[in-house]
RNA sequence: GCGGAUAUGGCGUAAUUGGUAGCCGCGCUAGACUUAGGAUCUAGUUCUGUAAGGAGUGGGGGUUCGAGUCCCCCUAUCCGCACCA
């Protein structure tokens, strides 16, 4: 009987589906385990072999855990909202709802062929109103909460209003856009509009004028993680900074907890480091500098942030960012024109230009001076774009001797440089002829008044103490992490549950959710930033009629304008893992029972490219829900594995430049300059050998191609590149499933190397894995003996149980596959026909190759199906050797091997060495030292 | 510039965590069976050498009886961040 994968694989897949084998319940006496994949964007291109890599790894682990008796939640869904889906829809001129539906169907078809154990009854789609209702609901909660820094927790806005009415802003330490101070009386005297304005300053979801990343080409604003090097991640279009009124999430409020939480999760160090860098925590001091000789009494001081308070005696100038609001007030009349020109120039520069010219120093003197609070010196204030508006206070004290950027600026404009830190205690030099600054935070202070002679670290503390005592500053922590801009001027996303009354945003009551995305006549974005939802004619009326619970809406017949932006892609993906726990709940996001049962994700598998996006947002989202008492754990993803990117392996043919119809095989090329390499579809190349007939048929221009062959073959060149349609190097998993079967594909993807490692896709070795399955099949179907199995067969079995179990536990799936191959070869050599030996082996293989395992389990007379089987019990007694072969070394050099009983002592082992005839050559006297490592080596030092 | 990771045959990789480096697979070589084979099976395959032997885990140094593995210094490649005060 042949291994007929194309018959048996669909048959078992149908069986699993029809019997609901992988359906999982939220109540089980078994221990629980939650294995999650990062759900895919259903893009138009379909899956390539890179996608399933992580899914196969997580499926193996999920199946393994199930066999070990766990109740395993292993769901899948689609991240269907957001830019990629919409861009694809625009390109193909179809409505995104239709293309998304089609793409999902295609993805599902491809996924089903690979034989995953997903519980599809829990499928989640971010574009489904039943799901995004809870995305909108969470947004409302964010809107109605603020972050209390004292409690380190989100609190209801209603409590804040009450507090303001009683005590005003006194004693409040809350995350906010700008610090405010007012009394209870003032609060009470304000009208609704003013109060809402104040509350907006504290809300965790807030509307504000902020500098945003505006991408005209995409017609929308983007979050920081969606922009790299001044270009949009999607499409690579230029991005400019623009002041716009946008919704943001006050994720910065959680910065400290996002850093702290990394201590408690089992992620790779590199990913933790990526997140720490992105959050960018730095300790330092905020210091107020007073202005010298300002007229009105207005704007008499400004705040700076520094991580080097110890260098305050070395300040020789101050710098404001071009956006700084103080500039207009302080600039001197003589300098006004020049400063305003500079500010205008700096603001109009694109982010890309600015980043490209980082090395170029520019700036203008404002004509104004500040006073150094410790030295009373008069210090010139400059404006320069090397100071960023978005970090700290947008103003710095410049210490050119000890900061390389300040140093470059001082050199360029001929400003004084003064040494205040030395590596040689008490010794200082004239810093004006230094060639570079001394940035290290080591050494001692010099020329620094009373802190001179202190170590840098102590000087920092001393200076902070002093400025705190003087009431002009404080110890503080700054974060690089900025609030997440949450609105997109696009169609294909969750609508905001927000309406405007007198220009003030209010939330639509949660009872009215979902606020469904309306049909529009035109869903394309506009270059002006006018959201496509503006085209929805009837929408506002529909919403109004649904919101009968809101008295304000019923009483007033006016149709209030709705928020027309939609939420970004990361909105829907930030909490989807929680929804899988209870996906069909129409009353709540997820039930308390469900979240208390599953807790959080035990194992999350996905790409590291989400390190500064999704994985930050999801952690923030979860922490917020944790504060509301909804999430059971503060961190959503306990263990995280990053699967490596699969790159493409492109093939090339070489066209003769002198004769365009002639293609030269790689080995026959004498000079690369004589040929043009042309990408060729990898599907018509096998092991770098071109199928010349299919090549002629591939494209009309090659129909008459002639070839210069080596050994009768045309050998193609190859190169590792990104997997992409344009390079004809996309490997479609369907083709491989059709040719070799799903089990071969699964095994081969794992066999390729460690899951975490990036690697080029190369189909070259797939034959070997397929050959193994055929052998394994033969071994299984030929087994007819119901006896126990020989000792050596059982030894092979138990060694395999041990090795494979250990390998799976440490996610080393490539070595597991090798182990199966070795075991199979050994058992074939032994002529094993014992079903009792092969049945447990089939269970071991089941997580990797579930279809063949089911079939063989059945053939070998196993009870029920492999899914119901138990992981084989390890009997260690089979692993114990009677005797051990020891390499014998003299002075570290291996000389020969002897066999010693396994239980031998050092004494007995030494006797055995002395007795060995080979020893006579070296062992003349007593050895100086004997190193006996039980089971490993005997080393004799002469 | 800062941070992280990686480096082993022609190729993908492995090494019981400090104990005979190169398991398993690809590819290649030879052979068997075949009308044929891109099927199957057998043997070989780190390099060098006819052989005995010698060399060998990116390079250099160190610790150790013993280093792919631990420590220090380089080099190369990949990834992340990048005027973050």
Image (cartoon, coloured by chain):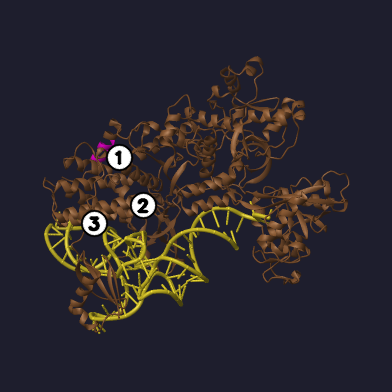
Separation of disc 3 and disc 2 at Cα?
20 Å
**Where residue B15 sits: x, y (%)?**
33, 62
Q: Nearer the viewer, residue A427 or A750?
A: A427
- Residue located 49% across and 54% down the image: A270
Tell me if mark 3 has few (under 14), some (14-19) or many (20+) residues whose alpha carbon lies within 10 angstroms of its own.
some
Q: Which residue is disc 3 drawn over?
A: A822
Q: Position of residue A921 (x, y in %)?
A: 22, 83
Q: State the residue position of label 1.
A: A69
Residue segment shown in magenta: A8-13
Q: Is residue A197 visible?
A: yes
Q: Chain of mark 3?
A: A
**Which badge, 3 or 2, comes first in the chain's sequence?**
2
Asked if residue A655 lies in the magenta stretch, the reply is: no
Give the residue number, with chain letter if any, for mark 2.
Answer: A810
Counting residues from the start of the chain, the first of labels 1 and 2 encountered is 1
Name the image quarter holding residue A461.
Answer: bottom right
Q: Colour of chain A?
A: brown
**In the image, residue A592 lies at what x, y percent?**
45, 30
- At mark 2, the secondary structure is loop
């Amino acid at each position: 009987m042949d291994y007929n994968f194309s018959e048996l694989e669909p048959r078992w897949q149908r069986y699993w589906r029809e019997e609901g084998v992988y359906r999982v319940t939220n109540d089980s006496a078994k221990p629980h385990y939650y294995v999650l994949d990062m759900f895919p964007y259903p893009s138009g291109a379909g899956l390539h072999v890179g996608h399933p890599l992580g899914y196969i790894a997580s499926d193996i682990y999920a199946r393994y855990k199930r066999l070990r008796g766990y109740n395993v939640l292993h769901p899948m869904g689609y991240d269907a909202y957001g830019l990629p889906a919409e861009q694809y829809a625009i390109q193909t001129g179809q409505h995104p709802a239709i293309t998304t539906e089609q793409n999902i169907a295609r993805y599902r078809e491809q996924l089903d062929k690979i034989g995953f154990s997903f519980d599809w009854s829990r499928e989640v789609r971010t574009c489904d109103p039943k799901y995004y209702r809870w995305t909108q609901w969470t947004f409302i909660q964010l809107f109605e909460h603020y972050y209390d820094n004292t409690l380190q927790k989100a609190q209801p806005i209603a409590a804040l209003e009450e507090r303001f009415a009683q005590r005003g802003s006194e004693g409040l330490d809350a995350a906010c856009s700008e610090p405010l101070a007012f009394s209870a009386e003032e609060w009470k005297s304000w009208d609704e509009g003013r109060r809402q304005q104040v509350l907006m300053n504290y809300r965790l979801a807030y509307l504000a004028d902020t500098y945003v990343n505006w991408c005209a080409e995409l017609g929308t604003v983007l979050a920081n993680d969606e922009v790299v090097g001044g270009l949009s991640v999607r499409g690579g279009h230029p991005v400019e900074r623009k002041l716009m009124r946008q919704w943001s999430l006050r994720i910065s409020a959680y910065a400290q907890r996002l850093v702290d939480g990394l201590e408690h999760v089992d992620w790779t160090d590199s990913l933790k480091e990526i997140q720490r860098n992105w959050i960018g925590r730095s300790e330092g001091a905020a210091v107020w500098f007073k202005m010298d000789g300002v007229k009105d009494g207005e704007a008499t001081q400004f705040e700076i942030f520094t991580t080097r308070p110890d260098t305050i005696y070395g300040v020789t100038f101050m710098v404001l960012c071009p956006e700084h609001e103080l500039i207009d007030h302080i600039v001197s009349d003589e300098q006004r024109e020049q400063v305003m020109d500079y500010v205008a120039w700096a603001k109009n520069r694109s982010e890309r230009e600015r980043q490209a010219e980082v090395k170029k120093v520019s700036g203008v003197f404002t004509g104004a001076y500040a006073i150094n609070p410790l030295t009373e010196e008069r210090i010139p204030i400059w404006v320069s774009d090397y100071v960023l508006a978005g970090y700290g206070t947008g103003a710095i004290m410049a210490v050119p001797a000890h900061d390389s950027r300040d140093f470059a600026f001082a050199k360029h404009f001929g400003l004084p440089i003064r040494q205040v830190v030395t590596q040689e205690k008490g010794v200082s030099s004239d810093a004006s002829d230094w060639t570079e600054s001394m940035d290290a935070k080591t050494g001692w202070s010099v020329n620094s008044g009373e802190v001179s002679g202190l170590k840098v670290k102590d000087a920092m503390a001393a200076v902070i103490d002093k400025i705190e005592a003087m009431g002009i500053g404080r110890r503080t922590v700054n974060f690089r992490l900025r609030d997440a801009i949450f609105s997109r001027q696009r169609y294909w996303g969750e609508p905001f549950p927000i309406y405007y009354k007198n220009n003030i945003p209010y939330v639509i009551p949660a009872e009215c959710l979902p606020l469904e995305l309306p049909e529009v006549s035109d869903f394309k974005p506009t270059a002006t930033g006018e959201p496509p939802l503006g085209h929805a004619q009837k929408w506002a009326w529909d919403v109004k009629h649904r919101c009968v619970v809101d008295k304000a809406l019923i009483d007033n017949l006016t149709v209030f304008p709705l928020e027309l932006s939609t939420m970004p892609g990361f909105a829907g993906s930030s909490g989807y893992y929680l929804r899988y726990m209870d996906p069909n709940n129409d009353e709540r996001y997820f039930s308390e029972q469900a979240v208390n049962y599953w807790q959080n994700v035990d194992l999350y598998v996905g790409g590291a490219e989400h390190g500064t996006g999704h994985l930050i947002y999801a952690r923030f989202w979860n922490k917020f829900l944790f504060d509301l008492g909804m999430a059971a754990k503060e961190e959503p993803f306990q263990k995280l594995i990053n699967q490596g990117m699969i790159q493409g392996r492109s093939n090339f043919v070489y066209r003769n430049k002198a004769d365009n119809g002639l293609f030269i095989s790689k080995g026959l090329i004498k000079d690369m300059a004589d040929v043009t390499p042309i990408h060729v579809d990898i599907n018509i190349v096998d092991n770098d050998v071109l199928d010349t007939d299919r090549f002629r048929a591939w494209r009309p221009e090659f129909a008459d191609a002639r070839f210069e062959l080596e050994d009768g073959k045309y050998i193609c060149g190859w190169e590792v590149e990104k997997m992409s349609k344009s390079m004809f190097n996309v490997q479609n998993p369907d083709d491989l499933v059709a040719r070799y079967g799903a089990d071969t594909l699964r095994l081969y993807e794992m066999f390729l190397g460690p899951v975490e490692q990036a690697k080029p896709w190369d189909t070259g070795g797939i034959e070997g894995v397929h050959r193994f399955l055929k052998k394994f099949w033969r071994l299984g179907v030929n087994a007819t003996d119901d006896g126990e199995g020989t000792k050596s067969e059982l030894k092979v079995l138990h060694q395999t149980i041990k090795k494979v179990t250990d390998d799976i536990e440490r996610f080393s799936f490539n070595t597991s596959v090798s182990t199966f191959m070795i075991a199979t070869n050994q058992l074939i050599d032994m002529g094993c026909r014992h079903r009792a030996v092969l049945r447990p082996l089939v269970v071991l293989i089941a997580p990797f190759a579930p279809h063949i395992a089911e079939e063989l389990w059945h053939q070998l007379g196993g009870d029920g199906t492999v899914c119901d089987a138990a992981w084989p019990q390890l009997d260690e007694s089979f692993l114990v050797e009677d005797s051990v072969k020891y390499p014998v070394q003299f002075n570290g050099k291996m000389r020969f091997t002897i066999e010693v009983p396994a239980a031998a002592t050092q004494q007995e082992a030494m006797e055995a060495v002395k007795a060995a005839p080979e020893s006579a050559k070296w062992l003349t006297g007593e050895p100086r030292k004997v190193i006996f490592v039980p089971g490993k080596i005997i080393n004799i030092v002469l």
